[in-house]
């Protein structure tokens, strides 16, 4: 009798784990109510075909996994202070960087913390050891006094985001 109870409990646990796994697969963004089919791979498979998706129990539902090769980036300066500037002025600064990793650096985007801070970044990959520039234009408009703005650079680096900062003291014109 004791053995039958243990077997029944193991069956219940197995079903519960199956339901949890099904929910993870269903919520992982496949858009389908059926789990993805994972094809077997062999040595003659087409190398241009991406590897099949595998289930990662530690991945959160809806989380995007970034499998791109990672590299590192090093900026000469991570912060620039324009000092005293006037309202409605145009202020430019160039942040220079080096790809210090072993993979090509791909900057996916660079975003200013507000519309007054506009970055311009290289769209082509930067080879290992190569250098590049991110030009930031700050137009304070009618802002006044001490201002601090950020540019977030998103690339195939670890960490994925790098923050650059500009500062200025904006005086009435």
Image (tube, grey):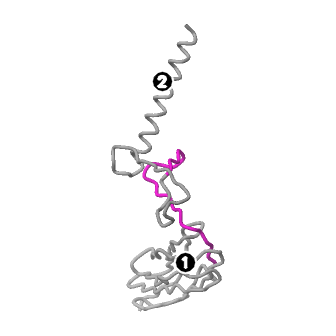
Q: Which residues are magenta?
A: 54-74
Instruction: Answer few, some or many: residues within 10 Å of disc 2's Cα (few below 14, many 20 plus, some between 14 and 19).
Output: few
CB of mark 2 within 8 Å of CB of mark 1?
Answer: no
The quadrant of the image that shows the N terminus is top right
Residue 113's quadrant in the figure?
Answer: bottom left
Compared with 139, 151 (above or below) is above
Q: Which mark is residue 165?
A: 1
Q: Which numbered mark, 2 or 1, is in the foreground of this view? A: 2
Real-space Cα separation, disc 2 to disc 1, in angstroms: 55 Å
Which one is earlier in the sequence, the residue at label 2 or at label 1? 2
Compared with 20, 49 (above or below) is below
Q: Residue at x 49, y 23 (%)?
A: 11
Numbered-mark total = 2
Residue 172's quadrant in the figure?
Answer: bottom left
Compared with 6, 16 (above or below) is below
Where does the image place residue 78, in percent across and percent down from the top left?
Answer: 60, 79
User: What secondary structure prevails in the magenta region?
Assistant: loop
Where does the image place residue 115, in percent across and percent down from the top left?
Answer: 39, 78
Instruction: Answer few, some or many: residues within 10 Å of disc 1's Cα (few below 14, many 20 plus, some between 14 and 19).
Output: some
In reply to whether residue 72 is colored magenta, the answer given is yes
Q: Which mark is residue 12?
A: 2
In reply to whether residue 86 is colored magenta, the answer given is no
């Amino acid at each position: 009798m004791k053995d039958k109870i243990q077997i029944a409990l193991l069956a219940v646990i197995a079903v519960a784990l199956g339901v949890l796994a099904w929910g993870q697969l269903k919520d992982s963004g496949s858009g389908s109510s059926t789990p993805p089919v994972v094809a077997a791979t062999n040595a003659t498979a087409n190398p241009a075909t991406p590897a099949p998706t595998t289930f990662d129990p530690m991945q959160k539902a809806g989380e995007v996994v970034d499998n791109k090769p990672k590299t590192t980036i090093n900026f000469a300066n991570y912060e620039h202070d324009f000092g005293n500037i006037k309202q409605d002025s145009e202020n430019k600064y160039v942040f220079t960087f080096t790809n210090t990793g072993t993979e090509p650096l791909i900057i996916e985007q660079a975003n200013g913390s507000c519309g007054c801070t506009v970055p311009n970044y290289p769209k082509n990959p930067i080879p290992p050891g190569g250098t590049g520039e991110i030009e930031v234009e700050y137009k304070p408009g009618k802002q006044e006094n001490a201002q601090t703005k950020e540019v977030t650079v998103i690339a195939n680096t670890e960490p994925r985001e790098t923050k650059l900062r500009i500062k200025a003291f904006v005086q009435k014109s």
